[in-house]
Amino acid sequence: MTNFYKTIIAKAIALLLFSFNSSDLNPFINLSKNMVEIPVMDVNFYMMNRSDVDAATLGQIRENVRYLNEEFEQTIIFEVNHFFINEGHAYLPDLHKEYFGVEELTIDSLVENIEDQGSINIYIFDSYVIQEMNAELMGFTPIFRASHKDYADASPSFDRIFLAYSALEKKTTLVHEMGHFLGLDHPWEMSDINKDLMGLSEKSDISENHMAYGPSVDGFTSEQLERMQHFAKQFRAYLINRKEFVFQDVKVTNL
């Protein structure tokens, strides 16, 4: 090989190396910086006071889970693990009263022998209109107010969400209750500082938020989504089945 061709090849290699080291021309992606860890949590559904599978109810449940994942915007992924049919009978408002100590507690007698540990257990009961409120109870979630770190020790007693069958039609009830399950409060329970921290500084932000009540709720703030993901990883980590890794905001140039 002549010196002329050796010189040409050396210049070409130098130019190629320069291109790889240039911040403007580098075609490689830093995978660690663009890789995002998404916790995946299993959910079980218990269709109570039922002896047969209802295809329509199953369809509604699947649609609720689809909508749940849509509203969480890949900060957490929820996957259906099991469906259960059980003839245990109670009305949702009665269970709500029992949970708050108004009457003798019977929730455990209904569910503790059938619930699956390691998943979010969602129980669906019949409901009725509460006369003094002129409204039907759609759902509630037992939570620890004082010490979130106790969730793991108490599992599965506080791994429960309770819904009404009629709540499946609207889809937003499950999203609202999952917000409670993962550390969010109603806006009216929060101080002004905490509302600001959760991106709820404007009245319109509150009225359209999933943690409020009303016909126009349709989303979480980015701050709430971040809060729930952090809460899941810190206080509900024992319920994380696995983690998925996805790439976000990846821009590739000069390929």
Image (cartoon, rainbow, N blue to C red):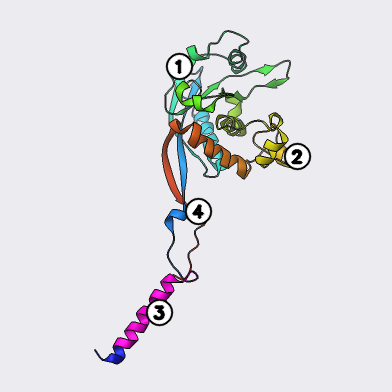
Q: Position of residue 226 (x, y in %)?
A: 57, 42
Q: Which numbered disc, 1 or 3, marks the residue that appears first in the sequence? A: 3
Q: Which numbered disc, 3 or 2, marks the residue that appears first in the sequence? A: 3
Q: Secondary structure at mark 1?
A: loop
Find the distance from the CA under tag 4 to the CA under tag 1.
41 Å
Q: Badge 1 local density, few (<14 within 10 Å), some, or many (20+)?
A: few
Mark number for residue 112?
A: 1
Q: Badge 4 local density, few (<14 within 10 Å), some, or many (20+)?
A: few
User: Is 14 in the magenta?
Assistant: yes
- Can you tell which of label 3 and label 2 is closer to the viewer? 3
The residue at which mark 4 appears reads as 248
Q: Which segment is the magenta one?
A: 6-25
- Can you tell which of label 1 and label 3 is closer to the viewer? 3
- When the figure is inspected, residue 233 is found, relative to residue 121, above or below; the finding is below
Mark number for residue 15?
A: 3
Image quadrant where one finds the C terminus: bottom left
